[in-house]
Image (cartoon, rainbow, N blue to C red):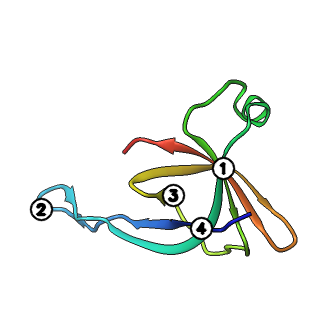
Amino acid sequence: MRYDTKIYMRTVEPGVYDPVTGNYGVPKISEVEQMAAIQDTGEERMKLLYGKISQGSLTIQLQNHYDDPFDRIRIGEKLYTVDMSRRLRIKQIYVVSEVQE
């Protein structure tokens, strides 16, 4: 299995509230790069997880554990949310689905 795809663990800190205008400032986005092996999620696993076939679902495998908190995973220009996480002895597996922002 090749860990040849760059993924980014994204954390978003909301902007500061401005009471004069009633708006929030620009959020601060920070990303940590990881190398991962990515495959499509199989139909059987999708049926178990979602109860249906879900487009845009991927299975991501990291060679080591990732312990820092994060909000989303970015692969290329697409954002994904974690639906399931499994921590194995030396690896970490995420089943993710695409989100629109």
- Quick one: SS at disc 1? strand
Residue drawn at point x = 56 percent, y = 32 percent: 55
Q: In the rendered structure, which amino acid carries the disc numbered 2?
A: Val
Residue 28 locus on image (x, y percent): 33, 70
Q: Tell me the residue that label 4 is attached to.
A: 4
Of 42 and 29, the residue lying toward us: 42
Image quadrant in which the N terminus is located: bottom right
Of mark 4 and mark 1, the one earlier in the sequence is 4
Q: Tell me the residue that label 3 is attached to.
A: 72
Q: Tell me the residue that label 2 is attached to.
A: 20
Foreground: disc 2 or disc 3: 3
Q: Quadrant of residue 61?
A: bottom right
Residue drawn at point x = 41 percent, y = 73 percent: 30
Q: Tell me the residue that label 1 is attached to.
A: 39
Residue 16 locus on image (x, y percent): 27, 68
Q: CA distance from mark 3 to mark 1?
A: 18 Å
Q: CA distance from mark 4 to mark 3?
A: 20 Å
Of 25 and 95, the residue lying toward us: 95
Tag count:
4
Q: Is residue 96 left or right of residue 6?
A: right
Of mark 3 and mark 1, the one earlier in the sequence is 1
Image quadrant in which the C terminus is located: top left
Q: CA distance from mark 4 to mark 2?
A: 48 Å
Q: Is residue 1 left or right of residue 72?
A: right
Foreground: disc 2 or disc 1: 1
Q: CA distance from mark 4 to mark 1?
A: 12 Å
Q: In the rendered structure, which amino acid carries the disc numbered 3?
A: Arg
Of mark 4 and mark 2, the one earlier in the sequence is 4
Of mark 4 and mark 3, the one earlier in the sequence is 4
